[in-house]
Image (cartoon, rainbow, N blue to C red):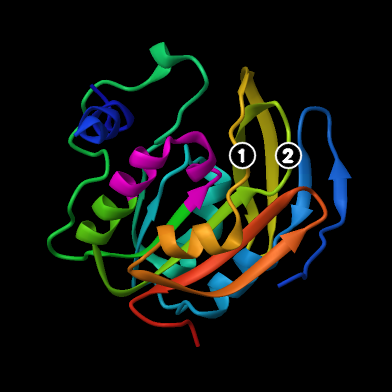
Amino acid sequence: MGWLSRIRAGAEEARAGEGEVVRATSSVARASPGLAALFQGMRRDGSHSILDLGEGGNKQMEVLAPYARIIRFVGLVPGDDPAADQPADPATLPVHPDHPYDVVLAWGILDRLTPPERVALIERLAEITAPGALLYAWVSSASADTMRHVRSTMLSVDRVEEELVGSPRAAGAPLLPAHVERLLTPWVVSQAFSLRVGKREYVARKGRAVG
């Protein structure tokens, strides 16, 4: 049972950076003011312990490497097919006792979870991150009947490539800013960006505002 399945089992009990869009064959690249704000709060000395909830890849590693001592990708939501959920793996959302994560990247994941699953995820992240940990998250701000998983890849510290993968599935109501801020507790949102591409990006620090 993967981490997403474990979450489900446990759950039973400011307008800026409008983002020019460059179209590629099967993906789009856009500006990311949220990532730019996140990296402004990070040290470029290779000291960070980074937990990326996405699928990762060489380009992601290349962008993060100057900032990170530890980088772990977990592919929390690998695709739309439930059969694609990964089997139990000790590397999935693990505790890192020597260097608790001080940066978390959450790519469209909150949109994919039910309300109890979202709470369980944030509680788990709070357990395995350091005081003052930074968090970057984007959520959809578009109203639609269906949605597809978005695979996100950092191209630079202020630019991201996104690709729709998997089959359409029923979409819930968009997460409103006030709801996101409450959900992310104990992180405190300090910067939020509404984009023309139908997303909101959030940057938050655990326990206090960024800056």
Horizontal side of residue 184 vs 29, given as left or right: left
Reply yes or no: does residue 160 show up in magenta.
no
Q: Residues within 10 Å of mark 2 (few under 14, many from 20)?
A: few
Q: Position of residue 144 (x, y in %)?
A: 73, 32
Horizontal side of residue 207 vs 165, given as left or right: left
- Residue at 63 percent across and 24 percent down: it is 165
Horizontal side of residue 98 vs 166, given as left or right: left
Local secondary structure at mark 1: loop
Q: Position of residue 21 (x, y in %)?
A: 86, 49
- Residue at 33 percent across and 48 percent down: it is 119
Q: Residues within 10 Å of mark 1 (few under 14, many from 20)?
A: few
- The outermost residue toward the bottom is 211
Label 2, on which residue? 143
Q: Quadrant of residue 177?
A: bottom right
Are discs 1 and 2 less than 8 Å apart at CB? yes
Local secondary structure at mark 2: loop
For residue 8, the mark is: none
Which stretch appears magenta? 106-121
Reply yes or no: does residue 107 show up in magenta.
yes
Q: Identify residue type, mark 1.
A: Ala
Residue 78's place in the image compared with 185, above or below, is above
Label 1, on which residue? 173
Q: Quadrant of residue 201?
A: bottom right
Q: CA distance from mark 1 to mark 2?
A: 7 Å
Q: Identify residue type, mark 2.
A: Ser
- Residue at 53 percent across and 47 percent down: it is 107
- Image quadrant holding the N terminus, namely top left
